[in-house]
Amino acid sequence: MTAHPAWQKSSYCGEGDACVYVSAAPGHLVRVADRADPAHLVLATTQAAWADFLDAVKAQSHG
């Protein structure tokens, strides 16, 4: 039996379903989806690349 991913909702959400969800995945990966449903997966990336992306977004919002 495969465990279902534990999706975490972004703290920066718009109205309604305008949110991004992330979940840890095997092999040091991060899943990114437009809703808390793995069928709507839009991206899988490494944890390092995800951290770099978040750092860039934070830097942009403070600049």
Image (spheres, rainbow, N blue to C red):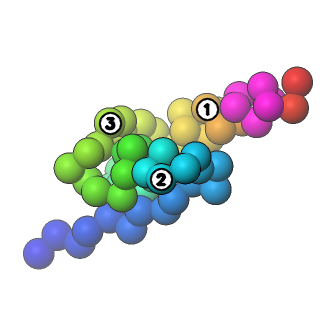
Q: Which mark is residue 10?
A: none
Which quadrant of the figure contains the C terminus?
A: top right
Q: Quadrant of residue 25?
A: bottom left
Q: Which quadrant of the figure has residue 60?
A: top right
Nearer-N-terminus badge (1/3): 3
* Residue at figure coordinates x 26%, y 68% from the top left: 4
How packed is label 3: few (under 14 Cα within 10 Å), some, or many (20 or more)? few
| Furthest-front residue in this view | 15
Residue 55 occupies quadrant = top right
Q: Which residue has dot 3 on it?
A: 42
Give the residue at x 61% y 32%: 53
**Which label is found at residue 53?**
1
Secondary structure, magenta segment, majority class: helix
At mark 2, the secondary structure is loop
Q: Which amino acid does label 1 sit on?
A: Phe
Q: What stretch is highlighted in magenta?
A: 56-61
Residue 54 lies, in percent from the top left, at 65, 38
* 52 or 13: nearer the viewer: 13
Q: Nearer the viewer, mark 1 or mark 2?
A: 2
Is residue 58 covered in magenta? yes
Q: Which callout, 1 or 3, points to the residue nearer the camera?
A: 3
User: How far from the left and from the top, in percent, is residue 13?
Assistant: 59, 50
Asked if 63 appears above or below 44 in the picture, the reply is above
Mark 1 residue crowding within 10 angstroms, few (<14) / some (14–19) / many (20+): few
